[in-house]
Amino acid sequence: MTSMVTGPLRPPTPAPRPAAAADRPVLDLRGVTKVYGEGDTAVHALRGVSLQVGRGDYVAIMGASGSGKSTLMNILGCLDIPTAGRYRLDGLDVSRLSDRQLALVRNRRIGFVFQSFNLIPRTSALANVELPLAYAGVKPAERRARARAALALVGLSDRAAHEPNQLSGGQQQRVAVARALVGAPALILADEPTGNLDTEATTELLAVLDRLNRSGRTIMLITHENDVAAHAQRRIRLVDGRIVEDVHR
């Protein structure tokens, strides 16, 4: 006897799809700890830090000396790995990567901006900005075009041929920002980027970072200055290796 269908036909439920790149967090830390040393001399730099940062967010990390701020920055930048917990960068579980793989991630997915600029002396601004692309094997004509575009984004098109000693501190830091963004990284990680700048140069640099964030760049800013942190949409404060404040504005 043939059975009858008494209700409307329904299509089969589709299998769940993985989250699109635009939907997943750029940074996803779950229960991250970092311990240096063993036994009685062990130092617990991070104690169960959990943190998610979405695409296009602008976040400031604050904390006094010894708070775990630098350790967190090193882990976020794949310069160190957690003792325990999980860290995913743009969907990639970096805690499982080899040193060589971590180096590739640093070059391709993270744009670093340091307090000390870290530009190569006696080398033009353009060549400094090209450097990450050269390491990535990008052909000379393409990397030169992309470096020029990055310098234009930070307002330094007319300084492309200048060497670092021909630039002011603020201009050198903007070259460093151009170098950080030239590879279109998932994250721009800026560690005390205004620490060596005067008030005017600080204002100019923060205006550049604000503009980059408005264009959709994800920025993580490590700072101890409230005026600098005020530019971010979200402020996170660390004390003794734990997040004690996470404020959105």
Image: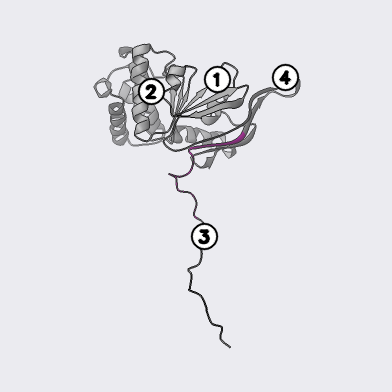
Q: Residue at x 38, y 33 (%)?
A: 133
Distance (Cα) linking label 2 and label 1: 24 Å
Which disc, if any, is residue 176? 2
Number of numbered labels in the structure image: 4
The overriding secondary structure of the stretch rendered in magenta is loop
Q: Position of residue 243 (x, y in %)?
A: 58, 27
Neighbourhood count class around disc 3 (C-alpha, 10 Å): few under 14, some 14–19, many 20 upward: few
Q: Position of residue 151 (x, y in %)?
A: 30, 26
Neighbourhood count class around disc 2 (C-alpha, 10 Å): few under 14, some 14–19, many 20 upward: many
Which disc, if any, is residue 15? 3
Residue stretch in magenta = 17-31
Which disc, if any, is residue 63? 1
| SS of the residue under disc 4 | helix
Question: Which residue is farthest right?
Answer: 40
Question: Which residue is farthest top?
Answer: 198
Examine the rendering and report whether any part of residue 171 can be seen. Answer: yes
Q: Are marks 2 and 1 in contact (CB under 8 Å)?
A: no
Q: Position of residue 173 (x, y in %)?
A: 37, 19
Front tag of 2 and 3 = 3
Distance (Cα) linking label 4 and label 2: 38 Å
Foreground residue among 224 and 235: 235
Q: Earlier in the sequence, mark 3 or mark 1?
A: 3
| SS of the residue under disc 2 | helix
Q: Earlier in the sequence, mark 2 or mark 3?
A: 3
Distance (Cα) linking label 2 and label 3: 45 Å
| SS of the residue under disc 3 | loop
